[in-house]
Image (cartoon, rainbow, N blue to C red):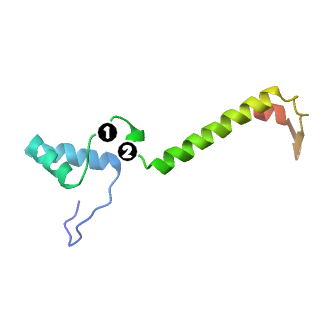
Amino acid sequence: MLSSDFKVNIVTTEKLLAMVDERSGSVDLATWRALAGHLGLRRVRDVAEATDPKVMTRRDALRSYKDASRAYFAKARPLAPIVLERNIERISSDAILSG
């Protein structure tokens, strides 16, 4: 890393972790905890606790929609397959959906 007048460097996650590993030996745990407190960081049990409630509400709505769609289509009659053609290649929509 070159010295400069800039106060910020953009690095990859791997480089950041290497820098922290390299330099953290001289920083004690109390200092790290004080920094976390200064930044307003707090320990959370899971991702949901640290995520904006609006995001979780929308996630739950999408899950409900997905579940309702699967339940509906599980009861519906099978759809007629469509054959797609491109140049000399032909493929059925069933083959695409089955993965």
Q: Which residue is mark 1?
A: 44
- Amino acid type at mark 2: Ala
What residue sits 53% from the left and 45% below the top?
A: 57
- Amino acid type at mark 1: Val
Return the residue nearer the eye: 47 or 16: 47
Point out the residue furthest to the top here.
75
Inter-mark Cα distance, 1 to 2: 7 Å
What residue sits 79% from the left and 32% below the top?
A: 73
Give left or right: position of 64 versus 97.
left
What residue sits 61% from the left and 38% below the top?
A: 63
Locate residue 49, reporting x and y percent: 38, 41
Q: Which mark is residue 50?
A: 2
Could one spot residue 66 in this view of the protein? yes
Crowd around label 1: few <14 · some 14–19 · many ≥20 (10 Å): few
> Considering only order in the chain, which callout, 2 or 1, is on the residue closer to the N terminus?
1
Give left or right: position of 56 versus 33.
right
What residue sits 20% from the left and 49% below the top?
A: 36
Quadrant in the picture for the C terminus: top right
